[in-house]
Image (cartoon, grey):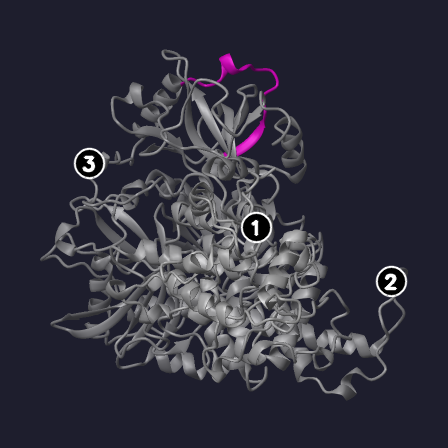
Amino acid sequence: MPPKRPAAPSTPSKAKKAKPAQTSIASFFSPPGKAKPAATAVRAKREPSVVSIADSDDDVVPIDAVDVGKQVDSDEVLARKLAAEWASDQAPNGNGKGKASDEAAAVKKKPVAALFAKREPKAETHPTPEPKPNAEAGPSRPTKISSARAEPVDPIDFDTDSLLFRPEAVDVSKWPGGRLPYSILVGAYVQVSRTRSRLLIVRVLTNFLHLLVARCPQDLLAALYLLSNHLRPAYVPFELGVGFMVLSKAIKEVSGLQPRDLKRLWEKHGDPGDVAFEAKSNLRTLVAPAPLSVRDVYDRVTGLAKLRGQQSGKLKGDVVRRLMVQARGEEVRFLVRTLIGNLRIGAVRLTLLTAFARAAALHEMTPEDFEGILPLPEKGKKPPDPVRERIEARCAEAVRLVRRVYVRHPNYDDLVKGIEPGLDGLEQRVPVAVGVPLSPMLGSITRSIDEVYTRLGSLPFAAEAKLDGQRLQMHIRADGPQGDDDGGRWVEGDGGMVWVRLFSRHLEDMTEKYPDVCALGLALLSRPLPSGRPAFPSWSSNPTPTVQELLNAGKVTSLIIDAEIVAVDKDSGQHRTFQELTNRAKKDVKIEDIKVVVEVYAFDLMLLNDVPLLSAPFSHRRHLLRTLIEPFADKSNPMLARFAHIANVDSVDMKSPADLRTFFDEVVEQKAEGLMVKLLESGEQATAEPIDIDAEDDDPDGEAEGEVAEPGRKKPLPATYEPDQRSMGWLKVKKDYLEGLGDSLDLVPIGAWWGLGRKAGWWSPILLAARNPESGALEAVCKCISGFSDAFYKALLVRYPPEGSPDVCSKGSPLGFVETGGLVPDVWFAPSEVWEIRGADITLSPVYPAGATFIGGERGLSIRFPRFIRVRDDKGVDEATTSEEFAEMYRRQMARPGVVPAKRAAEGEAGSDVEGEVDVGGFDEEA
């Protein structure tokens, strides 16, 4: 129970009331005639129980206009304004008392919360704040409590049949200035977060977005970003800079809670949104703050990223505090979650795109299209309804279109603009563009070499080396970006000037991390093209006239290349480990400071001379890439990035399946992870068994599209480039899927974090440890998220319950002697189980301490791509793998031919800001 706050202090005498130094507005709402005791004044200052009207919308200063040197105390200014207004309203009303005295007496007779019972719904329902004055009418004076001011916006139930939902029937007359109230968006949040049914979530979001498209299109873009849990496109570097300290201070100031009480809430809930909601739920306000609008919230939250300098922390805290004061009920919870970038509503990207596409399709339809449609029965079998089937077919086509456009151009700004004229022609209005990354194509896991032939049959394919590096999407254009100029770098040299932008597999901007690769972009476009150009292979399909024209182009002006960045030895050219790349700083890297040479291995071409090539077969794309973009290395400067084509072997050149096994062994000896097998020409093949799309391995959120084929059914196998899909035309054969480490490890689970996305409500990832035989400590080895089933996750919650068993699962201190290198999981497990784990290989780690004392260095050891195999019920914790055994396995691995030992951290890039082993624990920078 929150601490009991002191009663509102009495109003001072008239002499004191006229004092200009009065800053607390609490005194203006109390009966006159009784001076405020000094002790009470001090206590009120320390524990504010009444929110100042200074936090109304009328006094919010636009963030762009903030001048740190001229920042004023708006609380004091508005308190004085309110005092003057209140004094002028003390005219007698017939009983010898002023209007303020009557209202103050009412406050004294019953709790303040009761005064707002009809104005503010309970937290369990959708908060509906009252409309604020029209912004165009100019600023208004602070307003006293009144029924007109506090009139709520009616809540909207979006859980209705999408095909019968009519936006024109919704009353938007109370929306201030016709703008979307934040409470309506939060109402959608609440309805979505209360279910795990994907159909229900899509229905709620479809109706909500349909309402915006039809009645409030000016707020559609802001609402989409707020729903998507991203405030800008994913590839645009954007940080709010609102940390734990800023949030805690704002919550404490707004709620008036003591630090000890706030700490209890943090320990109980953990989630900042839940903490803020609980802290403010007991707050009593005498003046209803101005309601929030979606546009206002979006502008003020994104404006936080613009604040820089010594005073930025204070200014950000002021903005957060004002927003929290204005937020009501559930708005507080989701406002804070927006600030930390974790909404926890279960609406992933593909779900949101589906709802948006359906809303756009429904908006385009006329009333005649819905004539004769039957309502869905509450229970039982659905009756035949040709009208509904026809509408659903149009919606399904719209979903395919919008998803296809978005994965090729993931930018809501451009998508909303492109969809305004209608769905027809959307692909032409929002095309593949240099400067906007495509969601990369992914490969399906294959468990054996023989399975490659089982899946692909006699169709032609290419087997490429799967290198141990970082996925790269390289955008180069001589005339600058085609999209917004929100990143990238101009590179100038003897060959002219080009614009370059680099993206990771997760669409993160890596331009600043690899200036040497940017310089390579200039060399690729400025070189003369080869004169003799071979024709497309005879066994390939006939190229289109556009593709044939590209092969004969006189100059290359733009490129989008899919490639892999690999660290190489500058003298021998041997590949070095992926760990070398993680030692490079992410920002402000200078070419002269680079110590680790990288090579860019290109394996696909997605755009050439502003012509998208996604629909061309892989045989054509690869031929254009290898013919027009030849390998390159600057011999005068061996430290600059190099360019090469990925090593490969084609099935048309193989004499037998044994040749594929030989090539696999060769690339593994050269420290590659395995093979990527890709169809050269599209076709179809009967599947002999269900295909396992292991999305958990490379797609922790479960958002990448994949399909499971039914046994014996003919299935199309595309050789086109399919962004964001785990295509059947790409097969991944990794060494750890075939054999992994020479030996498995028996590790002890010692802690876990709460899962996100599909794994919300479960423990994921799990922190595993090996046993140090000398110290007796359990030393952390890795985080593991792969190999678990849903049934295992549920059983794990039973064995390690988050509540009620502090001796088994603790949120406070470790339940044993552990060494984690500074990692602190959400909960600590009592060491009691042993799990068998396999992985790709063992790497040096700047994070995990396991085995550090046995390899004679400051860094420990970890496992690449760990995968759970089984629980070892036959082993106790004392029989787990020791750190000494772990170190010996690492030595045997490094003694294998073709392995170049990783350098120590001190020999890496200067200014490294690596926070952990990004390739451990499920994050995988590979295809």
Q: Answer left or right for 668 relative to 571.
A: right
The answer to whether residue 883 of the structure is visible from this angle is: yes
Residue at horizontal 47 percent and vertical 69 percent from the top: 57
Position in image of residue 855 (x %, y %): 28, 22
> For the residues marked 2 and 3, what is the alpha-carbon distance in whole angstroms?
66 Å
The residue labelled by disc 2 is 378
Residue 905 appears left or right of 545: left
Q: Nearer the viewer, residue 265 or 737?
A: 265
- Segment tinted magenta in the rendering: 867-882
Q: CA distance from mark 1 to mark 3?
A: 52 Å
Q: Secondary structure at mark 1?
A: loop
Q: Is residue 377 above or below residue 872?
A: below
In the figure, is residue 356 to the left or right of 895?
A: right
Q: Residue furthest front?
A: 96
Q: Amino acid at mark 1?
A: Leu
Indicate the quadrant where residue 905 lies. top left
Disc with the residue nearer the chain's start (2 vs 3): 2
Categorize mark 2 by other alpha carbons within 10 Å: few (<14), some (14-19), many (20+): few
The 10 Å Cα crowd at callout 1, few under 14, some 14 to 19, many 20 or more, is some
In depth, the one of 45 and 456 nearer the eye is 45
Mark whose residue sits in front, 2 or 1: 1
Query: Mark 1 — residue?
Result: 283
- In this view, the residue in front, 656 or 366, is 366
Amino acid type of the residue tagged 3 in the rendering: Ala
Q: Nearer the viewer, residue 707 or 704?
A: 704
Three-letter amino acid code at disc 2? Glu
Residue picked out by circle 3: 906
* Residue 159 in picture, x, y percent from top left: 74, 64
